[in-house]
Image (cartoon, rainbow, N blue to C red):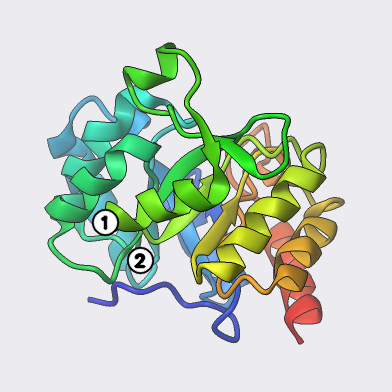
Amino acid sequence: MKLTPNFYRDRVCLNVLAGSKGNAREIYDAAEGHVLVGVLSKNYADVTSAVADMKEYAALIENALSVGLGAGDPRQSLMVSQISAQVQPQHVNQVFTGVGTSRALLGQNDSVVNGLISPTGKAGFVKINTGPLSSAASDAIVPVETAIALLKDMGGSSVKYFPMGGLKTRDEFAAVARACAEQDFWLEPTGGIDLENFEPIMEIALAAGVTKIIPHIYSSIIDSASGNTRPDDVRTLLSSVKKLVG
């Protein structure tokens, strides 16, 4: 079982949601394998049913599975860890405080485990109280370098920077990207990314020298009628990645 994502030129791997198993395979083919296919834990009643279904997804896409929370819902943190322990996906989405649990239950260091941090309105500083209890407490705002060091302490692979709000947090995002590059940490921008702002967002991360980037493009490329991600849009994104990375 392959546990590491298939990055294009060892630099970029897309992350998009699947509306169905058939859609998952369409996405995977459209991205030529350079994708992590998101399936949300929130869509399942319990861990057992989630594990059974997600294993079927994983078998269709060479394990390029991304176990999701569901709109960054901190209440899903433990369920994500429990699912991931059994499924062993390539990618795990976590709130900041859930990273250590996910890594420990995975029992290996190859799967990507991200940790959710949020913008604060001040470049160079991020909010880390994104857990089930802490998200309802007073904001814990720390330098982004400290947040990355804490994620490394917990066995994290990458920063999940959410919500981006598209390019609204340009200066803050650039500061996060620089810090990730300096500390050799991966970066996952998400929230409000679409076909129009994808390239400018990626240019910021690439120019900063981030070693590996996993951009999440969700609702903007989902067909509202079917609930499926549009394969043609995934092809467009991959073309952009090829152009930007070279």
Let me know if residue 92 appears in the view: no
Residue 189 vs 142, above or below: the answer is: below
Assess disc 1: are there few (<14), some (14-19) or many (≥20) residues with their C-alpha within 10 Å of its C-alpha: few
Q: Position of residue 159 (x, y in %)?
A: 50, 52
Q: Which amino acid, mark 1? A: Glu
Count of numbered circles on the image: 2
Q: Quadrant of the N terminus?
A: bottom left
Q: Residue at 73% x, 29% y: name it.
A: 121
Position of 123 with respect to 90 (left or right) is right
Q: Is residue 56 visible?
A: yes
Rendered location of residue 152, percent (x, y): 35, 58
Label 2 element class = helix
Disc number for residue 56: 1
Q: Amino acid at mark 2?
A: Leu
Q: Is residue 86 left or right of residue 218?
A: left
Locate the C terminus by quadrant: bottom right
C-beta proximity under 8 Å, tags 1 and 2: yes
Q: Which residue is mark 2?
A: 60
